Image (cartoon, rainbow, N blue to C red):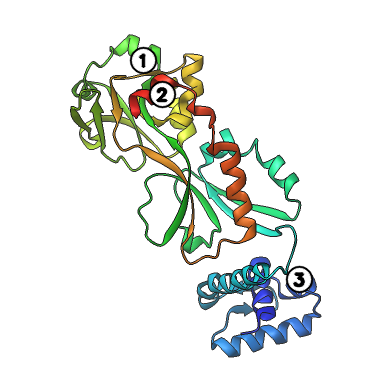
């Protein structure tokens, strides 16, 4: 299969413009159209719908696109292994991450990353609701969870605990819980999934926080607004420590049940599809994030929290 035709198809699919994609690759519009038609005959499917007004990706084209990208990535990786290709990584990285984490930690780092690698562009998809990496054809994603999907590979970025917290004003008005059972008498703020969370004490006792049985007056799908809701006194919530450590330092939040910890310790993972070759552009982004956040993350400098969690 002609990799030049695949490259043309990928650019045309991304731009939804065959002539524009051809010009980027030094091809006249008629030549670009002919090459795409030849590729479609070869694969036996119409990859792009054409009309006099627009170009759109067909269902077969959408299914074929990630495989075309993979073939090109493998070709580039093979050439790089033989000492060919660009000295510096080039291209666009499709990167999915938590919008809350991106606001706090990623955005301040991006100017340095883009300055260090001028040949790279970033296509960011930021949401606290996880994207499907395979369907979205992402090169890389940052996830704060246990890695369970066998179709993904990952590199651990950093450890991050979750903590129960509330505002001082809320606790002054509603009382301070002494045991997990006391939480049933309080307003709780839940994240969208409302997943049960297991608590363990320093002495080894266990308890389960079941949101479906608790008084959850607010359910949120965004970590930044969950933090703000807790600071506003709407209730008690479990938050990732990277999200609230600055609030603890300011005194706008305090820990609830400090003798107990959330047992399902999660980590920040940089994940990518198992089928993907780890290209130079993705590798440098992974290495950069590990350099900046993996060795001494800003939220790790609280011994009293982490000594209890180890």
Judged left or right of residue 202, residue 42 is right
* Residue hosting label 2: 230
Left or right side of 160 for 236: left
Task: Answer whether labels 2 and 3 touch (C-beta < 8 Å).
Answer: no
Badge 3 density bin: few <14, some 14–19, many ≥20, Cα 10 Å? some
| Tag of residue 20 | 3
For mark 1, give the secondary structure.
helix
Q: Earlier in the sequence, mark 2 or mark 3?
A: 3
- Find numbered disc 2 in the image and state the secondary structure of the residue it sits on: helix
Q: Position of residue 71 (x, y in %)?
A: 58, 74
| Residue drawn at x 73%, y 50% as measured from the top left | 117
The residue lying toward the viewer, choosing from 231 and 241, is: 241
For label 1, the residue is 170
Residue 174 is situated, as x and y percent measured from the top left of the image, at: 29, 13
Q: CA distance from mark 2 to mark 3?
A: 50 Å
Q: Are marks 1 and 3 in contact (CB under 8 Å)?
A: no
- Distance between the alpha carbons at the discs numbered 1 and 2: 9 Å
| Quadrant in which the C terminus appears | top left
């Amino acid at each position: 299969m002609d990799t030049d035709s695949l490259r043309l198809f990928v650019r045309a699919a991304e731009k939804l413009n065959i002539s524009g994609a051809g010009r980027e690759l030094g091809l006249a519009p008629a030549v670009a159209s002919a090459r795409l038609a030849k590729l479609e005959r070869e694969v036996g499917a119409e990859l792009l719908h054409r009309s006099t007004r627009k170009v759109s990706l067909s269902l077969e084209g959408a299914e074929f696109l990630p495989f075309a990208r993979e073939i090109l990535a493998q070709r580039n990786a093979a050439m790089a292994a033989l000492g060919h290709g660009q000295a510096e990584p080039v291209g666009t990285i499709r990167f999915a991450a938590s919008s809350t984490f991106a606001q706090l930690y990623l955005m301040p780092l991006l100017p340095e990353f883009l300055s260090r690698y001028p040949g790279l562009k970033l296509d960011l998809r930021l949401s606290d609701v996880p994207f499907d990496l395979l369907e979205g054809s992402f090169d890389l994603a940052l996830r704060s969870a246990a890695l369970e999907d066998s179709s993904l590979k990952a590199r651990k970025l950093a450890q991050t605990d979750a903590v129960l917290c509330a505002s001082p004003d809320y606790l002054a008005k509603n009382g301070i819980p002494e045991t997990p059972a006391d939480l049933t008498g309080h307003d709780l703020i839940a994240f969208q999934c409302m997943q049960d969370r297991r608590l363990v004490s320093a002495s080894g006792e266990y308890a389960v926080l079941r949101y479906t049985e608790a008084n959850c007056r607010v359910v949120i799908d965004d970590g930044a607004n969950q933090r703000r809701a807790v600071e506003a006194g709407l209730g008690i919530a479990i938050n990732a420590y990277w999200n609230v450590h600055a609030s603890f330092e300011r005194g706008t939040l305090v820990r609830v049940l400090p003798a107990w910890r959330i047992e399902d310790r999660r980590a920040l993972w940089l994940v990518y599809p198992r089928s993907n070759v780890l290209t130079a552009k993705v590798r440098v982004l992974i290495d950069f994030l590990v350099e900046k956040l993996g060795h001494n993350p800003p939220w790790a400098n609280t011994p009293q929290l982490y000594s209890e969690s180890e």
